[in-house]
Amino acid sequence: MNETPLVMRHIGQLVTMNGGATFSEAFAVINNAALVVEGGNIVWMGPDEELPANVEGVELDVLGALVTPGLVDAHTHLIYAGDRSYEVRLRAQGKSYMEILAAGGGILSTVRNTRQASDERLLQETRRRLSRALLAGTTTVEVKSGYDLTADGEIRLLKLIRQLGQEGPWRIVPTALAAHAVPPEFSGRSQDFLHYLEAEYLPHVSDLARVVDIFCEPGVFSVAESRAYLRAAQRQGLSIKLHVDELADGGGGSLAAELGADSADHCAFTSQEAFQAMAHRGVTAVILPGTARYLNHGHMADARAMIEAGGWLAIGSDGNPGSSPTDSLSALMPWAASWLRMTPEEVWTAVTRGGARALKEESRGRLAPGLPADLVVWDADHYNFPVYYYGSPLVKEVYVSGRRVAVHHSEVI
């Protein structure tokens, strides 16, 4: 952490996300602002003209730029080996996600590559993805396991995720997703696979991850199977979240509400009634618009239903090799506004404080004295612009705990 205080001045707009306690009230902004960072945390922020005269430190003039909290990506699968770029051709031929999976492709091909990869290869490839995410403004990122599908292999992935988190500068929140798909060894025996994980995997998770996830989807793990597995995780003292209703309304959103999950993710086909139940139980809906568009199934999550139900919403990248090959949460912000009919204020809330709420990382995704100085300086002077303008990198600088960790060089040579 910085020993010398950092004094950031002449901020055109400082988005603090430090408004009210609900999703609709959370957005807040200070115009013509300044802030002071010491010991990795914000110690003062407010209008620039009110900056205390006795403040000392390294002064940084951002020349009217927009400054926001670091983005919080609440849903990624960034640890895996290889890619699936060959699937572009299969989709052009009309093959669906489930058809590719049934033919041994999709996630199963990534599982084969990941099982065969050395620790060092997995670390190197994942570091590159995390570095690209950081350059795009993401400072806190959930990383799921899920591309080995054996108890020992999934524990290996969680240990590698822990190592990457210790390296930093990013903050990683690990999630245990061994129940991502049914592996070839258990083909046609999904319940047997979950029983195997309950016995051989769940007892060893708590030292490596706080949360267990499952892909609750027709054709993968049923609602009944998911309920039994997640209750077993809860008996181990673990929190839970679910992949739900990505390809059909299979009842996963309602199950998330029933079990009091931290979040229900995807929600492309989740009903209004399920959103209302989730909002009532405090379950955050993590919506992944890039995935729905990339799979081209023509169905977007009803973000407005969750907002109008009074619930919390997050936007995640779903960075993964098959259905959302990206590291950039910020790249999805314009599309969240367009496809999900969200206002700029709602988009900013969803990629900062909403993501932090989904991950139970409440000190992230907002700015206030005493909180970590995770900041993004944008090539923009108004918070509307990054939600409007797409295709070009708009992040200028990224700070984690007050330390500059990424700079985008935009010079044309």
Image (cartoon, helix red, strand yellow):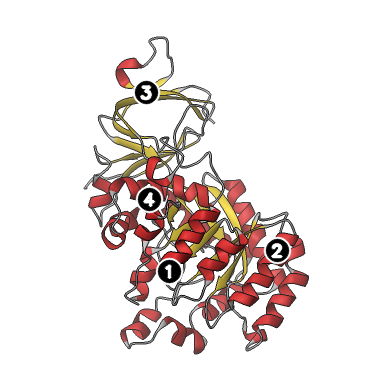
Return the x and y of residue 239 as percentages of the image width and height. Answer: 65, 56
Q: Residues within 10 Å of mark 4 (few under 14, many from 20)?
A: many
First-in-chain label (4 vs 2) = 4
First-in-chain label (3 vs 2) = 3
Distance from disc 3 to disc 2, alpha carbons, whole Å, reads 44 Å
Query: Which residue is the site of mark 2?
Result: 233
* Residue that appears at 29% across and 59% down: 335
Q: Three-letter amino acid code at disc 1?
A: Ser
Return the x and y of residue 194 as percentages of the image width and height. Answer: 69, 76
* Residue that appears at 69% across and 79% down: 193
* Residue 78 drawn above or below residue 181: above
Contact (Cβ within 8 Å) of mark 4 with mark 2: no
Query: Which residue is the site of mark 4?
Result: 136
Distance from disc 1 to disc 3, alpha carbons, whole Å, reads 42 Å
* Residue that appears at 59% across and 49% down: 165
Contact (Cβ within 8 Å) of mark 4 with mark 3: no
**Secondary structure found at label 1:** loop
Query: Which residue is the site of mark 1?
Result: 271
Q: Three-letter amino acid code at disc 2?
A: Ala
Query: Which residue is the site of mark 3?
Result: 46
Looking at the rendered image, the disc whose residue lies closer to the viewer, 4 or 3, is 3
First-in-chain label (4 vs 3) = 3
